[in-house]
């Protein structure tokens, strides 16, 4: 290399260093910021994806054998899909989410609708692997396995529910490098579940943060917004939908009236910690030390009144003993003293989530928490399925060791198999509807 070329390279390196120092991108965790590099798919991702898709199809076949008729919410979802197959596009007012799943499942009409999710499981594994590699390059497959085997997700996906399709579109949106195609994925996510507009907003805000330049804040902001024009269009379309529909809920909104249910966020924190329990035990000593710091102890002064005054029941929660939350509320959460007793557990859970995500810039973590609040807090009903997307985004980006992820996978399988056994082989009947089998599920 000649002297001129060497001097040019040195000069270029110095200029880039100065830009990084003067910019918000000087964050020491820059290598962990998503979207700065193109997501990568490996051949092993497709191998594991197809394997999990095939195993999922076997479980669906087992479900069809023992529960051939539409069950619970499937009655509405499958009914709407089969009307589409007949060319009847009238909307069932009992359905409150958009029709993406029903349109997608038209080729699977007349008894095969549940197999749609087996195909979607393949896509979930691939996109989840891409998402993981945007944050951490190690322990990819075992972490993704722990996520896709999340019991509440796996259980709802062997039935014809919208949760899996919603998750696939959201994770795909985050793991697609092109802004335009990412916006298409988020548009489809909103056609599956309206609240996914929040995750589209998170994507856009993080993109803006990545390219923010403190030397010219207005110009860099406007430049980022211009590059995100497709997300601006998506936001305008969503606002138009809310205006025309006179609200965010399709169909009958009476069972989905929003409420400031702040306790939902603490339920979510505990949900994450319980499902990632091997990592909790590994970090337990450090978690307890951090939880004894003055700021953490002061946070209890906020947590206690919030869970005392912003914990709510719901008519569905109190009346339906087929779901796990019914028993959690009946045995523990309905008692104010027992609710308050969980405050330290919620605080430790929050510290745990932050500890495993400390490699991600603080602002990104704050935005994630705000988006999670926006999704779960308005929900009146305690429903673990509402936690699937934020849990997945957190868990895929969190640090973990491979042995712990393997234990996590085995734990997820045990919980899922236990509940699946109750669902299939331990049906029961209600006295007011004799002869109709009820089944236990999330």
Image: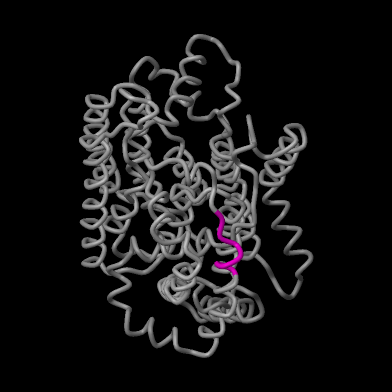
Q: Give the range drawn in magenta.
A: 306-312
Q: Where is residue 122 in the image (x, y as percent from the top left)?
A: 33, 39
Residue 19 occupies which quadrant of the picture?
A: bottom right
* Left or right of residue 348, residue 241 in this image: right
Q: Position of residue 423 (x, y in %)?
A: 27, 38
Magenta stretch holds residue 84: no
Name, please, the residue furthest toward the front: 431
Task: Identify which residue, 227 or 232, lies in the foreground.
Answer: 232
Residue 383, placed above or below residue 29: above
At x 50%, y 20%, the residue is 80
Any part of residue 358 in sight: no
Q: Where is residue 390 in the image (x, y as percent from the top left)?
A: 48, 56
* Left or right of residue 177, residue 180 in this image: right
Magenta stretch holds residue 309: yes
Task: Identify which residue, 32 or 300, lies in the foreground.
Answer: 300
Q: Position of residue 339 (x, y in %)?
A: 47, 67
Any part of residue 221 in sight: yes
Residue 276 occupies which quadrant of the picture?
A: bottom left
Task: Identify which residue, 98 or 416, lies in the foreground.
Answer: 416
* Left or right of residue 56, residue 71 in this image: right
């Amino acid at each position: 290399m000649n002297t001129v070329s060497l001097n040019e390279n040195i000069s270029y390196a110095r200029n880039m260093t100065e830009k990084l120092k003067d910019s918000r991108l000087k964050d020491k965790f820059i290598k962990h910021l998503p979207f700065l590099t193109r997501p990568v798919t490996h051949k092993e991702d497709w191998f594991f994806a197809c394997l999990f898709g095939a195993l999922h199809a076997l479980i669906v076949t087992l479900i069809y054998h023992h529960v051939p008729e539409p069950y619970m919410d499937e009655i509405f979802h499958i009914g709407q899909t089969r009307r589409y197959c007949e060319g009847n596009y009238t909307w069932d007012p009992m359905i409150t989410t958009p029709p993406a799943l029903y349109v997608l499942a038209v080729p699977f009409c007349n008894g095969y609708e549940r197999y749609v999710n087996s195909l979607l499981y393949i896509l979930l594994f691939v996109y989840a692997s891409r998402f993981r590699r945007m944050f951490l390059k190690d322990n990819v497959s075992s972490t993704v396995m722990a996520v896709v085997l999340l019991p509440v997700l796996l259980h709802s996906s062997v039935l014809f529910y919208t949760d899996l399709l919603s998750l696939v579109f959201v994770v795909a949106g985050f793991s697609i490098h092109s802004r335009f195609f990412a916006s298409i994925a988020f548009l489809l996510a909103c056609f599956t579940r309206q609240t996914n507009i929040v995750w589209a907003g998170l994507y856009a805000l993080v993109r803006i943060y990545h390219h923010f330049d403190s030397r010219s804040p207005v110009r860099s902001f406007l430049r980022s917004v211009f590059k995100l024009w497709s997300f601006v269009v998506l936001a305008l379309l969503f606002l138009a939908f809310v205006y025309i529909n006179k609200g965010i809920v399709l169909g009958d909104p009476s069972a989905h009236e929003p409420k400031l249910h702040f306790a939902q966020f603490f339920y979510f924190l505990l949900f994450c910690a319980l499902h990632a329990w091997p990592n909790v035990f590994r970090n337990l000593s450090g978690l307890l030390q951090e939880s004894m710091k003055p700021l953490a102890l002061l946070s209890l002064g906020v947590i206690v009144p919030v869970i005392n005054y912003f914990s709510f029941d719901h008519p569905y929660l109190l009346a339906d003993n087929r779901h796990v939350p019914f028993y959690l509320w009946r045995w523990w959460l309905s008692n104010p003293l027992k609710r308050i007793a969980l405050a330290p557990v919620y605080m430790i859970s929050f510290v745990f989530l932050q500890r495993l995500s400390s490699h991600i810039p603080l602002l990104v973590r704050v935005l994630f928490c705000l988006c999670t609040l926006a999704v779960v807090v308005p929900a009146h009903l305690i429903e673990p399925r509402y936690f699937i997307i934020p849990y997945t985004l957190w868990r895929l980006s969190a640090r973990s060791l491979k042995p712990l992820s393997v234990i996590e996978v085995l734990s997820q399988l045990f919980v899922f198999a236990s509940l699946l056994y109750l669902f299939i082989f331990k049906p029961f009947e209600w006295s007011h509807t004799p002869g109709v089998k009820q089944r236990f599920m999330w």
